[in-house]
Amino acid sequence: MAASTRPGYHLRMGHDAPHPPGPPAAGPARGRARWTRLVGDLLLIAGGLVLAYPFWSAAYAQVQQARLHAAYDERAASFARDIDAARGARTGSRPRAVPDDELVRRLAAQYRRGLRAGDPVGSLRIPRIGLDQLILQGHAVRGGLDPDADTALLRKGPVHYAVTPLPGLGEPFAVAGHRTTYGAPFFKLDRLRRGDAVFVVTPYATFRYAVVKTTTVKPSDVSVLGDRGYGLVLTTCTPPYSAARRLIVWATLQRARPLPAATRGR
């Protein structure tokens, strides 16, 4: 019994000895917090990219339009030289009067021969909505009002449905454009009203159209690209930020005027 009363006895026996401190355990809560922070950071980055998408896509379209203008100027100059060369080859022959519509048709046929997908066709100008952009030549494929083959081209600007004729070669001249991204050239297309003027300027002629009506159709309804007596058809997605339907603007040709350089000596 005396031994049990000696100071430190219980400590030596280990009954009351404190356990040495160990490293703190990384419990499940700490791991969950780390993953939560990581997911939050990723969501913030993704959200920033989504919010910035309209801005950088618009910048991309603007750069591409600038490049297209340089290519278009070169193509127009080359076309004018070809016309002058053809006119020079006919020197000495008696000039014959040709009506404007026939002259435009001949020039359009000549211009079409050198046109490839992605080449600039001409400019589309709609004063009411402040639009002035170059149109690209699309691929001659069917399948819908947003053919996959033209997806990359639409990022640069409005695209001509190549299954429809060029202005002066038949009707309609059909053009598609983005509504909300890549510069959104057709964002205000729904604001067009009956009688509004639409201009298409090509290296061979200037065409003036007047809006007749607007309608909506399914994306698969390619019948709007057929000849229904309208000279111009513009298509875009509707409502904005949705691809559920297609907004169609129908316009009739009012005037086709050959460019002055094409009328000399005709």
Image (cartoon, rainbow, N blue to C red):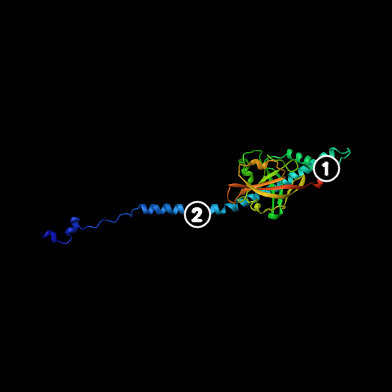
Tell whether 26 sits left or right of 265: left
Picture quarter with the N terminus: bottom left
Mark 1 residue type: Pro
Up-down: is 175 above or below 2? above
Name which quarter of the figure residue 117 lies in: top right
Picture quarter with the C terminus: top right
Neighbor class of circle 1 (other Cα within 10 Å; few <14, some 14-19, many 20+) is few
Q: Nearer the viewer, residue 105 or 138?
A: 105
Up-down: is 144 above or below 187? above
Q: What residue is disc 1 on? A: 99
Name which quarter of the figure residue 37 lies in: bottom left
Q: Residue 246: horizontal and vertical position, in percent?
A: 62, 47
Instruction: Using the image, tell me which numbered label, if any, was put on residue 204.
Output: none
Residue at 40% in and 54% down: 33
Q: Residue 178: horizontal and vertical position, in percent?
A: 63, 48
Say whether disc 1 or disc 2 marks the residue closer to the N-terminus. 2
Q: Nearer the viewer, residue 13 or 25?
A: 25
Neighbor class of circle 2 (other Cα within 10 Å; few <14, some 14-19, many 20+) is few
Q: Nearer the viewer, residue 76 or 245?
A: 245
Q: Nearer the viewer, mark 1 or mark 2?
A: 1
Number of numbered markers: 2
Q: Is residue 161 visible?
A: no
Tell whether 213 sits left or right of 79: left
The span from disc 1 to disc 2 (Cα, nearest Å) is 64 Å
Q: Residue 75: horizontal and vertical position, in percent?
A: 74, 44
Q: What residue is disc 2 on? A: 44
Q: Is residue 253 visible?
A: yes
Q: Secondary structure at mark 2?
A: helix
